[in-house]
């Protein structure tokens, strides 16, 4: 039996046995009863509390990055309003202002205005500070249909003018549009900085247009090109003077033969290798 036949037979066996194996697995996996579900929830709450308390320790020591990681782990196990509050604060301390504002808005949306009045007041002040520290970048984009990504996140704005509110620090901006070459831009922004930037994408046809081929009658003058009448006249004059020179040289040679004599002796001549003025 060839290798190909073995492969086909193996694939057929898998197809035939797969429904049976799935049914057996489904019978073996039994749904949890209520007691087990409650026990799991209690365990998650306990671990979430441990992560939360460890995050508080890190935050009080000024280690906000570690604190933020622990608060995230706590919320993944058991979301609480206090965890959202601390995430808003840790994001602010890490200059993640947009994330801080998002956490503040999430807290306010789920908060009890009467019971959590103090927390809401504190977060309102924090939001005002975060908004004031955001950098504002105004992009004038050509063409208008271009799409913009900031740090690999799509910006859902359209039109020639786009206003971006970004965290202080470094950012990578990428602009793309159909039939245009993409454009990339690196920005380093200060807190509360405002910057205007014009971005013009180059059309693909203009960017890749081949250089024009030289015309044959320009590149090769001998390939059927017609000469100018003035050039013809100059050529005739040149050949006329060349003929006169040849005749004069012949006459001079004859005269020199008489002057030098039959023994070949005469005045020594020096050859000039450069033209004289």
Image: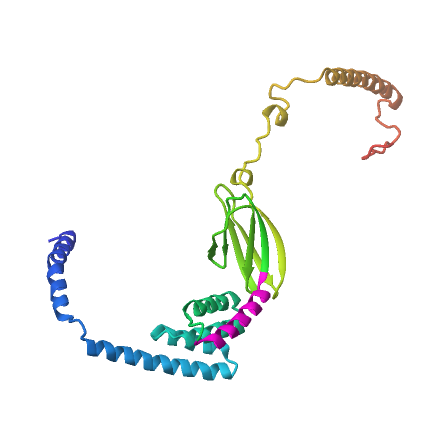
Asked which quadrant contains residue 71, the reply is bottom left
Please identify the quarter of the rendering in which residue 171 is found: bottom right
Q: In the displayed structure, would residue 133 be above or below residue 41?
A: above
Closer to us: 125 or 132: 125
Instruction: Judge left or right: residue 179 versus residue 225.
Output: left
Secondary structure of the magenta portion, mostly? helix
Q: Residue furthest front?
A: 114
State whether residue 137 is above or below residue 144. Answer: below
Question: Which residue occupies 53% across, 68% down?
Answer: 127
Which residue is rendered at x = 84% and y = 22% of the image? 262
User: Residue 44 appears at what percent x and percent y?
Assistant: 31, 78
Q: Is residue 214 above or below residue 136?
A: above
Where residue 50 sits, quadrant-wise, is: bottom left
For the record, the magenta segment spans 115-135
Looking at the image, residue 18 sits to the left or right of residue 227; the answer is left
Q: Is residue 168 visible?
A: no
Q: Nearer the viewer, residue 16 or 224?
A: 16
Residue 171 visible in the displayed image: yes
**Residue 110 sits above or below residue 36 on the image:** above
Q: Position of residue 182 (x, y in %)?
A: 51, 48
Q: Position of residue 14 (x, y in %)?
A: 14, 58
């Amino acid at each position: 039996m060839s290798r190909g036949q073995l492969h086909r037979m193996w694939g057929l066996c898998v197809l035939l046995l797969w429904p049976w194996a799935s049914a057996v697995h489904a019978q073996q996996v039994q749904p949890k009863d209520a007691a087990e579900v409650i026990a799991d929830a209690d365990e998650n709450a306990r671990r979430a509390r441990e992560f939360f308390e460890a995050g508080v320790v890190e935050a009080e020591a000024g280690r906000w990055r570690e604190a933020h990681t622990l608060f995230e782990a706590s919320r993944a196990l058991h979301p609480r309003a206090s965890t959202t509050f601390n995430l808003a604060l840790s994001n602010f301390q890490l200059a993640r202002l947009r994330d801080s504002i998002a956490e503040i808005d999430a807290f306010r949306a789920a908060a009890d205005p009467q019971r959590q009045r103090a927390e809401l007041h504190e977060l309102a002040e924090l939001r005002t500070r975060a908004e004031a520290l955001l950098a504002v970048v105004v992009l004038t984009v050509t063409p208008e249909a271009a799409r913009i990504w900031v740090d690999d996140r799509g910006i859902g704005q359209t039109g020639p003018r786009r206003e971006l509110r970004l965290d202080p620090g470094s950012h990578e901006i990428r602009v793309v549009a159909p039939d245009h070459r993409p454009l990339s831009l690196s920005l380093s922004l200060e807190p509360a900085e405002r910057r205007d930037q014009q971005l013009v994408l180059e059309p693909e046809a203009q960017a890749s247009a081949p250089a024009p081929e030289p015309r044959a009658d320009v590149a090769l003058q001998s390939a059927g090109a017609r000469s100018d009448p003035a050039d013809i006249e100059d050529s005739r004059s040149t050949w006329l003077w060349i003929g006169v020179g040849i005749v004069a040289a012949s006459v001079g040679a004859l005269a020199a033969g008489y002057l030098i004599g039959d023994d070949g002796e005469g005045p020594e001549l020096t050859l000039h290798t450069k033209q004289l003025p």
